[in-house]
Amino acid sequence: MVEILLDATVRAGTPILFATLGAILNERAGIINLGIEGLMLIGALAGFAGTFYSGSPLIGILAAFAVTFVAGSIHALITVQLRGNQIVSGLALTMFGIGVTALFGRGMVGLTIGGLERLPLPGLSQLPIIGRPFFQQDLLIYTSFVLVFLLWFFLYRTRTGLALRTVGENPAAADTCGISVSLYRFFAVTTGAGLVGIGGAYLSLAMTPMWIENMSAGRGWVAVALVIFSGWSSGKAMFGAYLFGGITAMQLRFQAIGTDISTHVLQMLPYVFTILVLVVSTIRLQKGSSQQPQGLGLPYDREDRK
Amino acid sequence: MPELLQIQNIRKTFPGVVALDDVSFTVAPGEIHTLLGENGAGKSTLMNVLTGLYHPDSGHMQLAGEPVHFTSPRDSLSRGIGMVHQHFMLVPAHSVFENILLALERVPQFYNRKHYQQKMQKLIDTFELDLDLDADVWKLSIGAQQWIELIKLLLRDCRLLILDEPTAVLTPQETDRLFKVLRLLQQQGKSIIFISHKMREVMEISDRVTILKKGSSIATLKRAEFNADILARLMIGQDRIPEWQKNLQMSEKVVLDIRNLSVRNDRGLADLDDFSLQLKEGEILGIAGVAGNGQKALAEALTGLKEINKGKIFAGDMDMTHSTARASYISGIAHIPEDRKSIGIAPDLDVADNLIMKSFKNTLFRRGVFQNRRAIRRNAEEKVSRFAIKAGPEGSPVRYLSGGNIQKVIIARELSEQPRVLVALYPTRGLDIGSAEYIHKVIVDGAGRGMSTILIAEDLDELLKLSDRIAVMFRGRLIGYADPRQTSREEIGLMMSGEQREQP
């Protein structure tokens, strides 16, 4: 029972984990991305289409990464090169994502694909309780484990990561050290978008191996909230994503057992939780333990007389 | 001696503003060359051109005889020109180590933390600095943060160091320390461009001084050629210096009684910590302290810009802590920062509108719900002539005025309500001498009429000259009072670094 619930937790949390890690990469460089929801949908459709036409989920994942990388470069172009408003650009990206996937996804509705298979890790998967949820999973989930560590390592143990964090904290300081603010920001936004796209692909390749219009169902927004909850750190993002996944898993369980509570109320739970998380973490932010990159949301213009 | 740096006829314009008109000067190897000029004279713009942050419209630069065109700070750094900016280029959330590491060249992707830490520690030890590499920068004093900036440049082997008002944030003792380090660097053959407008320091450290005025370099003088009077006269040019005379007439009547005030900042730390102060009628009370020890919070709490977490403000017997009457009882003026935003004016409105910002509801300036433009204009004409404001053509935005004239506009507005208490936060920082003297005159004249002033300043000479009493702040607390006629700079300096003194 616990195993099954944990298993469902990890599976429901993974797409959000990818999206949150991508968003953290964006925001660490100082760019807010409210286009996560749209990028997830684009990733979901690209991943599904890639898998459907090639027959290989791996190709699908690569397609999802590549297409969202390109979609993210629109946001990067507007916010980094043209110094546009990051909020507006992100919201536009979300709307664009919803619209464009509805349009191109029409022919995909009802088709089926093989989807990602579980690859039990020898030995580890036999462990009691944690064996099934953590070591009898598919490739993307294992990737997400590694990615959580890699992102931390990149940000805190490499020169490029230090430069990236500086770009997000104080772009003028980075500039005087000879770091190209726009280059770092551009790649942080596009690569981050690519990760979000993989999160989207997880929806259409593993969770429900088909394309459903608007299938991200607000998970992108949950990721946006989790970035703040996590304090821009990948480890806490994993915790937050699985917390959301756990509540999703439980409400599904409740529905399966059959209770008197309306399914609408149950389906609402993960989102209520998100609002709670935002409230709590915002209060914590105001109390001063601010982890927020100081340059977040601010376009950088060297000749701007500030 | 061949010059290390030659700057010829540099010109730089921003939309609508000529920031640099025609600037030429040279720096020799091993020279400490001071740039002197008021805010808006173009010092910072010039330095930003020199470090490649801005591109000049015209003019030439030569480094060691070769023409150079810097397109980014990376360019100038790689040629050995480094700058300590007035607003430090540090990341407060990162550690000292990370901040310095970022500035180094050729750091491998997977760097050896220990190796670089040793390298930095060696330099810290050479200059006998007290700096913890693992500490987060935001926890350090501003003086310590400046050392980080300097170490960054020294590790990169810069041959020309630019220091933009480095002493503004230091105690006199720390300034001495800095000068010692600068002389050491000078002996190693490094050139230094030093920006300051504290006359005493300029006299002490400079080999040569170049004076900037309204975007042009108007003179360069050698050590034997300048003294304080000559420099002052060059900076002022045609402007007349207002004269004022100070006489002691402080009464014992307390007009403002600040009791146990505490103010927390955005980080939740105490900016003001159990701060108490009594201000007497007609008194000019100077507040000394290293920048960042709560002076700004005090001014903001008194003028109502900052929420008071604990403590009371009394005017006589009246509790004013949360009273709306405080706004007309206490007025505030503050320094005009380089950027001229975030100050007590609406930069895009004209002088007339800025002058009535506090009193636009007054029936004098309106007819029913409409403005009385004629009265507003007449008010402006009267204030412009009384305060000798050079306002430019009618209707032009205030932000095009010089710092001194913006300050006069603010003073004209604040004093028009006849406040009992004036809080002046660095009122003369960055102003030319003429304007600074004018502000001194306003404060002293006000004291003659019974107005009390809390004067927060960083220049000890200014405080000693004007104040009836000097209160010293350290880490949001009152360390003690000093009598300007009996104390010395050294004694105040010690108090500024936190040494408790008996109250006189």
Image (tube, rainbow, N blue to C red):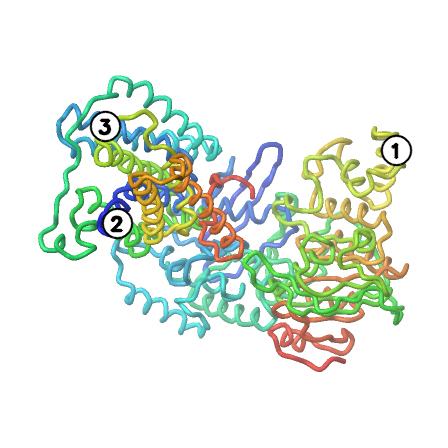
According to the picture, the residue beneath numbered tag 1 turns out to be: B375
Tell me the crowding category of disc 3: few under 14, some 14 to 19, or many 20 or more residues within 10 angstroms, Cα based.
many
Q: Secondary structure at mark 3?
A: loop
Q: Name above or below for residue A138 compared with residue B300.
A: above
The chain ID associated with circle 3 is: A
Q: Is residue A69 left or right of residue B349?
A: left
Residue, x 87% and y 52% (percent of image)? B418
Q: Nearer the viewer, mark 2 or mark 3?
A: 2
Tell me the crowding category of disc 2: few under 14, some 14 to 19, or many 20 or more residues within 10 angstroms, Cα based.
many
Q: Secondary structure at mark 2?
A: helix
Q: Please give the label number shown on residue B472.
A: none
According to the picture, the residue beneath numbered tag 3 turns out to be: A210
Q: Please name the amino acid that badge 3 sits on.
A: Met
CA separation, marks 3 and 1? 74 Å
Labels 2 and 3 in the same subunit: yes
> Looking at this view, is B501 or A37 the one in front?
A37
Q: Please name the amino acid that badge 1 sits on.
A: Ala
